[in-house]
Image (cartoon, rainbow, N blue to C red):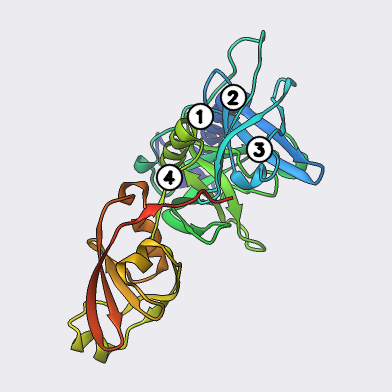
Amino acid sequence: MRPDAAAHVPDGGPGEDELLDAYSKAVIKAVELAAPAVVKIEASPRGGGSGFLFTPDGLLLTNSHVVQGVPHPRITLLDGRTAVADLVGDDPETDLAVLRIGLEGSGAAPCLSLGDSSGLKPGQVVVAIGNPYGFQHSVTSGVISALGRSLRGRTGRLIEDVIQTDAALNPGNSGGPLVSTAGVVIGVNTAIIVPAQGLAFAVASNTARFVASALLREGRVRRSAIGVTGQTVPIPRRVAHALSLAASSGVLATAVEAGSPAATAGLRAGDVIVSIGTVRAGGVDDLHRYLTADQIDVPSAVTIVRGHTRLQLTLVPRERAASR
């Protein structure tokens, strides 16, 4: 080695060993803070997943798909304690569920705080803890690869504001926490893309906080519906120009449920919805985003294209039955 080889490290700057040591210390600190609150969930003989306690009285978060069809899964904590959980509520639309366990006589349960995911940055170091393939409390680390992703859930609806990370996840990690180096939950690990490497996704903690609050309050997340089965279709440029539409696509109503808000308003199969309320309906996902609990029983102006005519209808969304 040349005598001046050390010149690659600026005077006074940290060497490679120091940087790696700092990274290791950050990950170790996060694991020490978070691991005691992470649980293994045995939902059926075929498998299970992960979860984490977020209150000292035994409430925990996991994925809806982990506990689907199993209202009383078995839970194992890091210290070896076990319990049978009760399902408080689940929301397949965001793939989240809240469980409750009783740890009578054993003191307060270790728990994690749900952080503010709106302040995250790409490149930020994150740590995932879970039970991949049953290997309890496995730790992986990486960075936030991207923010604001959308992920198609098992119900077909988009999960918004999803975190993409390269922290390795495998079957069994589902429902476990994605934490910052401070040991604060910033996401709930939910999906991977197979066979790609380094493509994993977590539902943002702000979404998890909203959903958990709704599940604790009512056992479900309320949403509205108009009674239309639709698909995204392009609007020919000549039609848009002739009807003065600032839209290149809309939602074709392939079926309208009898007695639904859409049917009552006069919407027919074959109509193309181009806006609802003040929102442009360029596709089915735009309708889903609009139809929140806030729209239940609130009149909404809907612009449609019927043949070569532009029409405006008024419909009143109703509360949608809970998904299962």
Q: Nearer the viewer, mark 1 or mark 4?
A: 4
> How many residues crowd mark 1 within 10 Å: few (<14), some (14–19), many (20+)?
many
In the picture of the structure, the residue carrying the numbered disc 1 is 183
In the picture of the structure, the residue carrying the numbered disc 4 is 222
In the picture of the structure, the residue carrying the numbered disc 3 is 50
For badge 2, the amino acid type reads Glu
Dot 4 lies on which element? loop
Q: Work out whether residue 16 can be spotted.
A: no
Tag 1–tag 2 contact (CB < 8 Å): yes
- Residue 253, compared with residue 30, is above or below; it is below
Which is nearer the N-term, disc 3 or disc 4? 3
Dot 2 lies on which element? helix
In the picture of the structure, the residue carrying the numbered disc 2 is 32
For badge 1, the amino acid type reads Gly
Nearest to the observer: residue 232 or residue 38: 232
Which is nearer the N-term, disc 1 or disc 3? 3
Tag 4–tag 2 contact (CB < 8 Å): no
For badge 3, the amino acid type reads Ser
Q: Is residue 321 left or right of residue 266?
A: right
Q: Nearer the viewer, mark 3 or mark 2?
A: 3
Q: Position of residue 215 (x, y in %)?
A: 49, 36
Q: Residue at x 59, y 52 (%)?
A: 191
Which is nearer the N-term, disc 3 or disc 2? 2
Q: Position of residue 273 (x, y in %)?
A: 32, 73
Nearest to the observer: residue 43 or residue 319: 319
